Amino acid sequence: MGALRERNFRLLFIGQSVSVLGNALVPVALAFAVLDLTHSPADLGYVLGAETAAQVVFLLAGGVIADRLSRRAVMLGADSVRGAAQAALGALLITGHPSVWLIAALAAVQGTAGALFMPASTGLTPAVVSQANLQQANQIQQVAQSGAWSPGLRSPRRRPRLRRARSRAGSRRPIGPPRPSAASCSSPKASRAKVR
C-alpha cells in the first residue's frame, strides 16, 4: 500500500475515516432520539428528510466554495459546524426534551455542513498524494467509506439459521416451499392446476 506510506495522505485518510464513521452513526442516533421522544415514524422521516434535503440543496454550492477557497479551510469549517450541531443536539437530548423541529433544524445544519465537506475532501486527495499512488489512494478511501456505512446491512446470523433448519429437517433438500408429490396431485382439481 504505497499510498499509505505517504504521510500527508495517511493523516488525511485517518481523519476522514474517523469522520465518516461518526457521520454513519449520526442517523442511527437521530432515529433512536426521535423515536424515543415522539414514538412517531413520521417525525423521524421529517428529521432525516431535513438533513438529506439540505445536503442535496447545498451540494452544488459546496463544490463551488471548495473550488474558490482553501479546501483545508472548507473541510475544517464544515466539520467544526457539524461537530457543533451534533454537540448541541446531544446537549439538548441529555438536558431535556427538544422539539422535533429543533432536531430537524440541527439535522439540516449537519446536512449543509456535509454538503460543503464532501466536494472539498474529494478534491483534496490529489493534492496530498503523488500521481503514481493517486488511483490506489482513491480506492483505499472508497473501501473505508463503504466499510463505515455498511456494517448494519448484513446479518451474520442468516447462514447459521439455515444450517440449523436443514439439520432439523434431516435432509439435504433446500429450504423452501414443499414440492408437490404425486399423491397431492391425484385429485382432478390439483391435476388441472399442475397442467396450467
Image: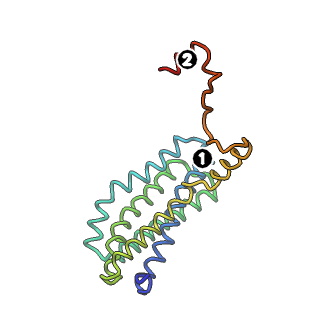
Q: Mark 1: give few (<14), some (14-19) or many (20+) Cα within 10 Å.
A: some
Q: Residue at x 65, y 22 (%)?
A: 183
Q: Residue 52 has which mark?
A: none
Q: Quadrant of the N terminus?
A: bottom left
Identify residue type, mark 2. Ser
Viewer-closest of 71 and 174: 174
According to the picture, the residue beneath numbered tag 2 turns out to be 191
Residue 157 position in % (x across, y down): 65, 53
Viewer-closest of 174 and 83: 174
Residue 59 quadrant: bottom left
According to the picture, the residue beneath numbered tag 1 turns out to be 35
Q: Residue at x 52, y 43 (%)?
A: 43
Viewer-closest of 162 and 35: 162
Residue 88 position in % (x across, y down): 54, 62
Q: Is residue 97 left or right of residue 23?
A: right
Relative height, residue 91 to residue 105 (above, below): below
